Image (tube, rainbow, N blue to C red):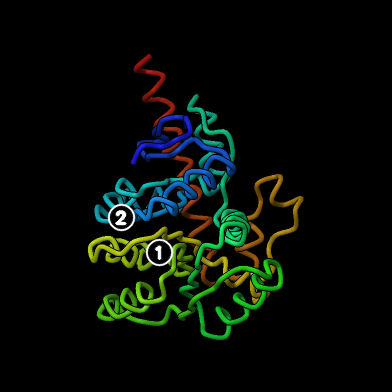
Amino acid sequence: MASTVVLPKRVAVMGVPVDPWTMAQTVERTREFVDSGAFAHLIGVNADKVLQMRDDPEMDAIVRRCEIVNADGASMVMAANRLGVPVPERVAGIDLMDELCALAELHGYRVFLLGAKREVVERTRDALIADYPRLDIVGIRDGYFGEEEFDEVAEEVSASGAQVTFVGITSPKKERLIERFRELDLKGVYVGVGGSFDVVSGAIPRAPKWMQQVHLEWLFRMMQEPGRLAKRYIVGNARFMALLRKEQKRMKGAS
């Protein structure tokens, strides 16, 4: 599908594809996908996703198939800057969700919320409607189902007539589910937003603005759930930085 707006071409950061777009450009491109009725998988890549791609060929292939790949993580913007790759800003999943809800309210797009616990997704729906009173949320479903139920979930989402579906499920289940939607020829835009429902619903607080601005949101998240996230962030970030240094040396040697 050709874009009606001129956008910077996809770049590679440490071998990972990234669309070097601002939030506004991402929202505009998403609007084009919704209006066309085409399928689109929107994914955000961060340090953890880079490592997943290195370890899992399926995840690597999925990311490369996605119609929009944002730098969802200060680590990706930092890495791009160090490698001399133009990536203008971080497009965080939770912020993109907010912007796309505003877009959906403005244009009357139908929205589906998929993921988290039932009470969390219900509170997410209520919070979004409080912020966007004319937002048309046509369905919700929790994220507690196995891969054997993917087709059933696809039928429910498709039957709702949703044009934008936010998928608040952890990786790699989230990505596999959306790609199953692709295989089943579903239409619409599918946006992976990870744990955003927990934040929007109030179940988990988001990092203060100052921590976001100095790129310490990951530390705040780890402090909220140290048992689940400590290894991911401490070990994962160290591995990511080692890969970045290796890539810097490779690029320097190639110049």
Residue 170, image quadrant: bottom left
Q: Secondary structure at mark 2?
A: helix
* Picture coordinates of residue 51, whole percent (x, y): 39, 50
Quarter holding the N terminus?
A: top left
The answer to whether residue 46 is visible is: no
Q: Nearer the viewer, residue 250 or 56?
A: 56
* Picture coordinates of residue 237, whole percent (x, y): 50, 49
Left or right: where does residue 117 sit relative to residue 12? right
Q: Could you say which disc has been placed on residue 201 in the image?
A: none
Three-letter code for the amino acid on which mark 2 is drawn: Met
User: How many neighbours does mark 1 have within 10 angstroms: few (below 14), some (14-19), or many (20 or more)?
Assistant: some
Which residue reaches farthest top? 255
Q: How many marks?
A: 2
Which residue appears at 44% of the width and 27% of the height? 248
Which residue appears at 35% of the width and 72% of the height? 158
Which residue reaches farthest bottom? 119
User: How many neighbours does mark 2 have within 10 angstroms: few (below 14), some (14-19), or many (20 or more)?
Assistant: many
Residue 242, image quadrant: top left
